[in-house]
Amino acid sequence: MGDNNKHEMWKENSLDLLDWEPVIKSSSKVLNYMVEYISTIDEKKVFKLLSFRDYEADAPLPLESKDLDEVCDILISDIILKHSPMNLSPNFYGWAMGCGNPVNIISSIVEAALNANVIGGNQISCIIEKQVINWLRTIINYPTEASGILTSGCTEANLIALNVARNHKDFSAIHNQGLKDKKYVFYASSQVHCSITQSLQILGLGKESLRLIEVCEDFCINTNLLRRQIIADIENGYEPIAIIVNIGTVNTGAIDNIALVSEIAREYNLWLHADAAFGIFGLMLEKFKKYSEMVHMLDSIAFDLHKWMQIPYASGCVFIKDKKLHCRTFTTQEGYIEHSEDWLSDYGISLSRDFKALHIWMFLKAYGIEKLKQCIEKSIDNTWYLYKKLSTLPNFEILCPPTLNILCFRYIGGTADRDANNINKGIVSMLQAQGECFPSGTMINNRFYIRICCMNYRTEKKHIDKLIDLCINATKAIQI
Ligand SMILES: Cc1ncc(COP(=O)(O)O)c(C=O)c1O
């Protein structure tokens, strides 16, 4: 359709259409395309290199309206077809990424169409978020009196929790006058995620306020060293504020001993926070019951829904046991947004908020929690399958047995230690570029490891077999 027809479809001086039929027609076309795309994902390369030029990202700003169907064709040819499946693919094992789910394709349509701003008040969107928060509280086994809020991810959730933690000892002074010359310090294992450091930097505490405590052989925090550091800091005039435990470290999936750390926190009157980005959902399984029974000891907990729960990006959650303190820290009641009862925006950073609760509501209504448990069990089984197969192969060194869904290993066949890092980096780059599987890598104790994170419910044992074959082939190719 040419420029002459551009006003036939769109109402003048409006974003609406004269007739809504094209919306139904075009969205059905895109939906059919996406269903075909996702249902054949196993046949697609997991990653394709794409340059700025391949996409013509420097194309000029569109000035005039276009026919919707024409735009949908461009959407398919220029965006969807050029997109790398990455985290959707069963052959993707990088970092810690969820792959979404078919049910939330439908809730995404409704979310965009309703365009609800989930700030507060008695709207259905706010009520659904509160219901979802209650369900999540049950899933993670956290006390009923705790407050919770959905966030954009675990980074924001950690930031919210650490803001409340920072203020907990001297609320009025910190809240009103700021840090001044406070010498606050925080504690976490050396395996803690960088979002914790970033949160402390945003809170004006600086990187050095985080004491990184060495880990034991199992990559869990060494509690003797933790206690020693707290004592030394107090003797040197610092004020310890909080300890952060990991429920699933990003490198190896290690779970810190919450009960032991909690004793230390109580002894020194410290806030106890957990970064449980993906690990929290592992705790639903019977074999991790001992950890799930420790979750109530935490003053706060942050986790993601877009990782192991497979909710679309960007979706996380934070719970704070002291609801009053949580609300006091974030409430911004001003004249134009004065309100009497609980408003969701009083518990987080954003005033305007999206309706991501709808995705979680729809997910739980459609699948139920047992289905998620089965998927999580499968991810852990796949990780153990990989561990057992690799253990039988010469020339591969495994860092440690898996706790949850992550395994780190490296090729050590006949090379000096100095070269092993480069060889393993080369293997990861080669596999990523080939696009048949996608591992990522990590540096631990100055050694580079190939890191496999089994987060995707589409991954079956045949994919793990393929991964091992591709790794072996890469070790051969890289040494020629
Ligand atoms: C342990 C851990 N904490 C925090 C984060 C940050 O989460 P997000 O990317 O959702 O902000 C991640 C991300 O991978 C993580 O693995």
Image: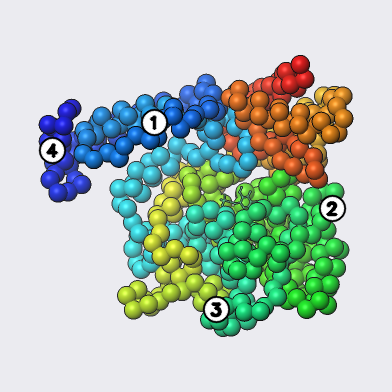
Q: Give the residue at mark 4.
A: 7
Closest to the observer, 274 or 178: 178
Which element is circle 2 on? loop
- Asked whether the residues under the numbered discs 4 and 2 touch, taking CB atoms below 8 Å apart as contact, a structural biologist would say no
Q: Residues within 10 Å of mark 1 (few under 14, many from 20)?
A: few
* First-in-chain label (4 vs 3): 4
* First-in-chain label (4 vs 2): 4
Q: In which quarter of the image is the N terminus?
A: top left
Asked if residue 70 is positioned above or below residue 320 in the image, the reply reads: above
- Mark 4: amino acid: His
Q: Can see residue 319? A: no
Q: Which of marks 3 and 2 is in front?
A: 3
Q: Which of marks 3 and 1 is in front?
A: 1
Q: Give the residue at mark 3.
A: 175
* First-in-chain label (1 vs 2): 1
- Mark 2: amino acid: Cys
Label 1, label 4: how far apart the Cα atoms are: 27 Å
Query: Would residue 353 appear left or right of 274 to someone viewing this image?
Result: left
* First-in-chain label (1 vs 4): 4
| Residue 420 position by quadrant | top right
Label 4, label 2: how far apart the Cα atoms are: 68 Å
Q: Give the residue at mark 2.
A: 216
Which element is circle 4 on? helix
